[in-house]
Amino acid sequence: MKPKLGLDLRPAMSLRLEQVCPCCGQPYYPSKTWRDQYDAVVLGTEQFAICPVCTQAPTQRVFDSLDYRERCLYQIRRLKNLYEQDREATRLNRKNRRH
């Protein structure tokens, strides 16, 4: 997993390290991520129904929190900036290869 995604390693109650999302606070499970994304596309969801960092559906308590929504907006801006920087770097690399 790329470190710039922002998932943290924290001790869990099961005495093992898990990747925990700093935005919604949930442990990261790849199978849950796929299922939540599928449900969001098929059923349609609200703007904050899928966490922008781990792409999992948050619990109802987290979803209703204004702090979670602010963290989502911050993470969306951060990820958008990373994406734009990566696109610019790729564009410059392609331009330099031609010359």
Image (tube, rainbow, N blue to C red):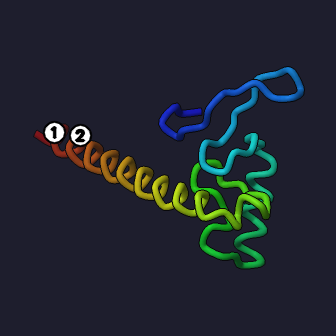
| Amino acid type, mark 2 | Asn
In the shown orientation, is residue 37 left or right of residue 5? Answer: right
Task: Give how far across and how far down residue 17 sits, in percent.
Answer: 76, 23
- Which residue position holds label 2? 93
- Disc 2 is placed on an element classified as helix
Quarter in which the C terminus is drawn: top left
| As drawn, 42 above or below 57 | below
Residue 78 x, y percent position in the rendering: 41, 51
Question: Image height check: is 11 above or below 74?
Answer: above
Which mark is on residue 34? none
* Residue position marked by numbered label 1 in the rendering: 96
Q: Is residue 11 left or right of residue 92?
A: right
**Crowding at mark 2 (Cα within 10 Å: few <14, some 14-19, many 20+):** few
Q: Secondary structure at mark 1?
A: helix
Label pair 2/1, CB-CB below 8 angstroms: yes
Q: Nearer the viewer, residue 29 or 47?
A: 47
At a point 39% along the width and 51% down the height, the residue shown is 83
- In the image, is residue 34 above or below residue 98? below
